Image (tube, coloured by chain):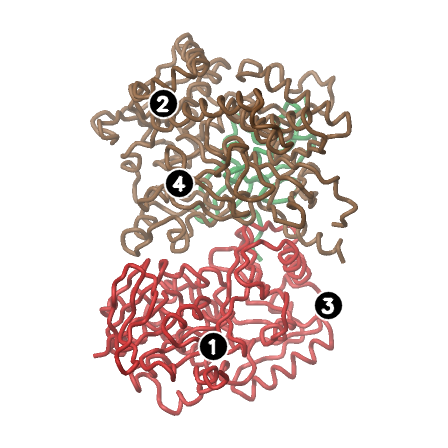
Amino acid sequence: MSTFRFDDVSIPFRDGQSVGAALVAQGILSWRTTRLEGRPRGLFCGIGICFDCLVTVDGVPSQRACLVRARDGLDVTTQEGSGYAAE
Amino acid sequence: MSAVVVVGAGIVGAACAHSLSAAGAEVIVLDRGSVASGTTSRGEGNILVSDKEPGAELELARLSRDAWLEVGEELGRETLELEEKGGVVVAASPEALDALSSFAAAQRSAGVTALDVAEPRELEPHLRAGLAGGVLYPEDMQVQPVLAAAAMLEAAQRRGARFVAGADVVAGVRDASGRLTGVRTSAGEVIGADAVVNAAGTWGAQVSERLGGPVPVLPRRGFILVTEPLPPMVRHKVYSADYVANVSSSEAGLETSCVVEGTRGGTILIGASRERVGFDTTLDVDVVSTLASQATALFPFLERVNLLRVYRGFRPYCPDHLPVIGPDPRVPGLFHACGHEGAGIGLAPGTGRLIAHHVLGGGPLAPEVAARFTALLPDRFVQEA
Amino acid sequence: MPLSDLPPDGVVIVGAGPAGLACAATLLDQGDTFVTVLDAGSGAGGQYWRQPAPPADSSDPGALRPDAMRGLHHDLGTFAELRSRLEAGQAAGRASLLTDHHVWTVVAAEGGHVVHAVDRSGGPGRERAVELRARHLVIATGAHDRSLPFPGWDLPGVLTAGGLQALLKAGDVALGPRVAVGGTGPFLLPVAAGLADRGATVVGVFEANSPTRWLRELRAVAANRTKLAEGAGYAATLLRRRVPVRTRTMIVEAHGRERVEAVTVARLDASGHPRRDTHRRIEVDAVGVGWGFSPQLDLAVTLGCALTADASGTPVVQVDEWQRTSRSGVSAAGEACGVGGAALAVAEGRLAARGIVGASASDAETAGLREEVARLRAFAAAMHRAHPVPAGWADALRSETVVCRCEEVSAGTVRHAIAERGATDARQVKQLTRAGMGWCQGRVCGHAVELLAGGGSGSPAERLVSTPLPLGVLASRKSRAM
């Protein structure tokens, strides 16, 4: 089965699934913390409207996990705050 | 005690109400919308001395800067998101740096602090490499305009001022001598006043006509880009030296020269284009693309940063690009306080004090200070006509 | 972008859901113009006929199969037919379907409009600016779930009802194992039925309104018997799966630390306020809540199309008998003209196409479509009247409950702006508190803030940029032109 990396874990997925669907299928419900209060967040609207499921994909912050298609070898990382390191 | 009607609850109207009520006037603020619902909510919140050449506008900017610090003391800097962040003007080429240096030299002679910066990246580490140089203006500040307008208006209300939202002024009421004694609203209500202040911003021309003392205030469209929220990446207000030429320009058509700055909320604002296209609300994709292109050229990290929002505002300008502040010589009782173009936020509290001085005949400013602002009086348009 | 790169002038349809697809299929049947359909999704179907992305390798045994999701969809036959007509158009060189294309703005231009999109098909970091000239533009942008805040609604595992269904339809994932579904509207039933059919334990469907409200709408119901049959089908599934359906009940709180662990539900009193003495706590692993849908109006508002209000007071695009908006060369079809379901969207899409090709108002087909639209609109109006947001929806909000999820603005802050600082609509609240200023630009919290401010049907937010795009992508337009 195809897999992508989520932090240090290998996540199996079925072709056609989004990154968010694949994570949720593995029981992972959150992959982001909010900027101000550090609260955990994951999927909410599931259709690209709410931007709650933001995640860093291949080093690019703030991608919508509900829209990004899972692909073999993708490097997905938890997004802390804005996803950008402060200077 | 004087009863004063202030037309407009934008930043200038709020500042006028704030100064007038502090000086003991009985103030009523009318706005056809709500507080800060026009141009005020569509600006970056610039409090700048850096972009102004010596003259009355720079004097007003310096008066206003001191006034902003006092407002910050009174109402709390946090409340206004007032920040003494400083501005950095950068020049890409040696030629642009020459022009910037002589501009800064003239400003220094007028009392502005302008420090040469050999390597702008020491101030702003994310700027691109290879810029020719820059000038640091430590006196430049930033404020959140809506919060500032709301806070000044609320402070005025605590001193007894009244604010009526949704009241459109349709006409002035005059006595037999021609003196303005009040205004009539669209609801048919007549509100009596010893003085009426036209602080209607971009709509100042229409209001001035309704009150019988027309002044030429025209709209100039501007777009501002707002990014996703980020950690602090841009510390100062950073702009390219071309902006200096733009602000004082009177040529027609589009001018863009980007200004990049961070906000308390984490977003980065990229302004500001200026176009004379009347009140056309259309989004011009080429204009916002040009701003994006200039901003990413200054700060390469912005390439991957998302644009979340574009807002569009209409900045009020007079043909000579100076605000019109003072009594209308044709209509006793009428005072103008509009036409601040892209500088209305920064110039608001100084304008408020100047208006209080004119309306109350004395007030907060010493006569020799007020005398510096004769170039802003409405008389210049009356004489032309 | 140089003009030579632009596809031929023709009709550009934004949205490949039921309305957009029906419009495209009819245009290809009836006219000879080139039809371009753009959609942010990975395939045609929209939210209603949402499908998994087509497999990269058709021999991959693990890949998701659209046919495996059959049971989740209603009226798939219509979808298959419309899609095959679009595919035939593509094969004949008369149509193009641009998936993963997010339209970020539209502007009027000489002879029509220019549609600006971001092509995200290359994946993160490889987005590209695309622009299309449209002689005629069709706005078929659909709708999204309407959300209302409640304590704990920001916990992971709490989704919109539509979010739960999207996971199921596009990802074959039934979130659970124990799941609660709440809010109001007939849409909650297929969500719960789909989850139950896929093995989730649906602990309850908590519908805030009473079915007796439908008794006032018998005329609209009688004229739309297929809707009744559809609802009855879902009800039968729920009965078979032993899913309790509780009416006049709402989820007032979600509990948990790092994720949702339980919900509290409460009965509503006669005036629509949750009764504290009826609180009941239920252990769950997931929650889906939906309060109906909000039409996506961004493009129409940007263009200055006239709006009107639907039966619930929600602003929608105003259209004439040909689905034409007040702007010349711009039509709208589907949920953007008022939420009313897929069958209505299909009829409106067809009608819009007939208007564009200049069909006769008197032909039988047009008359039939108009009748269908009127009948389904009447049903939609009945649905809006039968499923209002209850008066006491905000009773459970605590001062610290987050209202704006993006900027983390609390109910206390929003209420302070309204009560103490005089804000009377969502825009003013936003200016004073940042609620609605974040990533989603108020799409999630906007309705709630408007309700808290005492409005609820105010003028919709203007969003000149209808979806985010990297500044570098925008800047690249300039470097290419120079």
Instruction: Estimate the spatial distance between the alpha carbons at disc 4 and disc 3, rounded to whole Å.
Output: 48 Å
Q: Quadrant of residue C352?
A: top right
Q: Which tint was used for chain B?
A: red
Instruction: State which chain is coloured brown.
Output: C
* Residue labelled with disc 2: C283
Instruction: Estimate the spatial distance between the alpha carbons at disc 4 and disc 1, rounded to whole Å.
Output: 40 Å
Task: State the count of labels.
Answer: 4
Q: Nearer the viewer, mark 4 or mark 3?
A: 4
Element at badge 3? loop
Q: Position of residue C206 (x, y in %)?
A: 35, 23
Say what amino acid the circle numbered 2 marks: Glu
Identify the subunit bearing mark 2: C
Element at badge 4? helix
Q: Residues within 10 Å of mark 2 (few under 14, many from 20)?
A: some
* Residue labelled with disc 3: B130
Q: Position of residue B56 (x, y in %)?
A: 49, 84
Nearest to the observer: residue C45 or residue C341: C341
Q: Nearer the viewer, mark 2 or mark 1?
A: 1
Residue at image position (29%, 36%) is C396
- Report whether B69 appears left or right of A72: left
Instruction: State which chain is coloured green.
Output: A
Say what amino acid the circle numbered 3 marks: Gly
Say what amino acid the circle numbered 1 marks: Pro
Q: Residues within 10 Å of mark 4 (few under 14, many from 20)?
A: many
